[in-house]
Image (cartoon, rainbow, N blue to C red):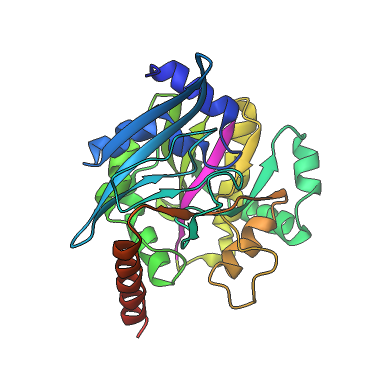
Amino acid sequence: MLEKNAWNRFVLEHGPRSGRFLQSWEWGECQQAMGETVRREVYEEQGKVAGVGQWIDRKVPLFGGYRFCPKGPIGPMRLTSDQMFLRVEPQTDEFLSHAKKSIDVNPAHTLITDLRQSEDELLAHMHEKTRYNIRVATRHELVIDLHHGSLDDVWPLFRETSQRGSFRLHIKQYYESMLQNLQGSSCSVFCAVAQTSGAPLAATIMVDFGDTRTYLHGASSNGHRNFMAPYLLHWELMRDAKSCGQRFYDWWGVAPQSAPPNHPWTGISRFKRGFGGEEVASPGTYDIVHQPFRYQLYSLSRAFARTIRHL
């Protein structure tokens, strides 16, 4: 087994462009602090590390369980298990010849902005409306706190945003655990806030790992929307990441270019694409089935539950 620094070096060198932080040692430790069972596996060829996988055990009432490797495995891996199935999110089509496509757990399509450009170049590659909205927000003299935002102060914003249908909200303790357990390490999570007169207008939860800053979760107020706070907040986060030597800003999920206009991510994707960047795609989430009959029953039960939720 690799020790922490060697593990992270391998992940940073060989991991996917988007989502490597999910395979970081620290992310696994954070998941364990939340009560998850985390297993790390190393695959060697000719005495050298060729692949790694950080797996999370999931229990499913009545069906046993499965193991999930978010944004992994990285490199080759022996995929054997006594679990019902293995859920994987590899960079390429390897492992997928006999796998079944599942609903994506983490984004398969994203946008990555190259921070190695100058600030003038970054602005030039933005949509003109995005540049305009940044200027509007600047005139409102918003106060931007990039690294020390309080989750307690901005939690109402996350509830408001969830109610508008932008994303499914985890319980507050989930975000608290990330912010508490992933600080001051090579994988670091923090909350950034834009506010006016002490009232928060926009907030983001970000993760820094290696050369990439990733936009994990965002929220904005129903009020003062004409202040364009989210635009300035992300611009300042990009400038800050650039000043810290990071090379990429991952927007963590956009709708595919071929998506229909009613795709649930249409609005947020338009916002993200306004900042410019490269579209990056991966195969998505797949299940490697070891117990076909039980897996079929599990799949039917999940499909039924989703139907009931949408009635």
Dividing the picture into quarters, in which one does residue 199 lie? bottom left
Q: Is residue 239 above or below residue 233?
A: above
Q: Position of residue 102 (x, y in %)?
A: 46, 61
Outermost residue to the top: 47
Above/below status of 290 relative to 145: below
Residue 80 within the segment the image draws in magenta: no
Going by the picture, which residue comes out furthest to the left? 62
On the picture, is 171 further left or further right than 286? left
Above or below residue 225? Residue 37 is: above
- Whether residue 44 sits left or right of residue 155 in the image: it is right
Q: Position of residue 309 (x, y in %)?
A: 32, 78
- Residue 28 locus on image (x, y percent): 35, 34
Q: Is residue 311 left or right of residue 109?
A: left
Q: Main SS type for the magenta part?
A: strand
* Magenta part of the chain: 211-221
Residue at x 39%, y 66% (from the top left corner): 162
Residue at (48% x, 38% y) in the render: 73
Viewport quadrant of the C terminus: bottom left
